Amino acid sequence: MRKQYHFRPSPAGLRAWDVDRLVSLSKDLVPELVPTADIRELDEAYWGGSMTCREVAGHARLIQEADPNFPVILSSDGRIMDGMHRVLKAILVGRIHVPAVRFSSDPMPDYVGVDPDALPYEEGSRLTPNERDA
């Protein structure tokens, strides 16, 4: 699977977290059951406002393949950092809770102010420290 990032806007530019690092940082957090009704992003534009039908089909495939045994990762304010496909799968199969872990304090982003298309998506590709901090 292609490298994934969690994005969130900020005054300094788009912040990006490497999802592999989020998974590693959250591995010792204690999972809890979170009501799907509490997931705010379900009622917000999440993957962009103008998805093509092909892109919707791609997300539908990812939802079908999602493994609900891995907890969703939430930021300290309860927003999704990883796991939206798992949340959607839970809703589609009628579950009203999802297992989730929550950071008490959010980790620093891996990138700030870097265009998402400029991030490394191939295994082994990395931005230099200067590119990361640009």
Image (tube, rainbow, N blue to C red):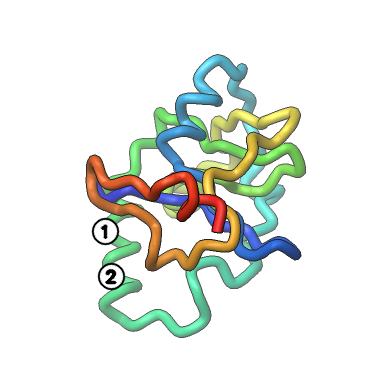
Residue that numbered label 1 is attached to: 61
Q: Position of residue 66 (x, y in %)?
A: 34, 44
Q: Position of residue 72 (x, y in %)?
A: 52, 37
Q: Residue at x 46, y 33 (%)?
A: 21
Q: Residue at x 39, y 64 (%)?
A: 118
- The kind of residue on which mark 2 rests is Ala
Left of 61 or right of it: where is 108?
Answer: right
The image quarter in which residue 107 lies? top right
Camera-nearest residue between 100 and 93 = 100
Q: Residue at x 26, y 58 (%)?
A: 61
Q: Position of residue 74 (x, y in %)?
A: 63, 39
Residue that numbered label 2 is attached to: 57
- Image: 25 above or below 90: above
Q: Residues within 10 Å of mark 1 (few under 14, many from 20)?
A: few
Q: Secondary structure at mark 1?
A: helix
Look at the image and tell me in which quarter the C terminus lies.
bottom right
How far is mark 2 from mark 1, CA to CA?
Answer: 6 Å
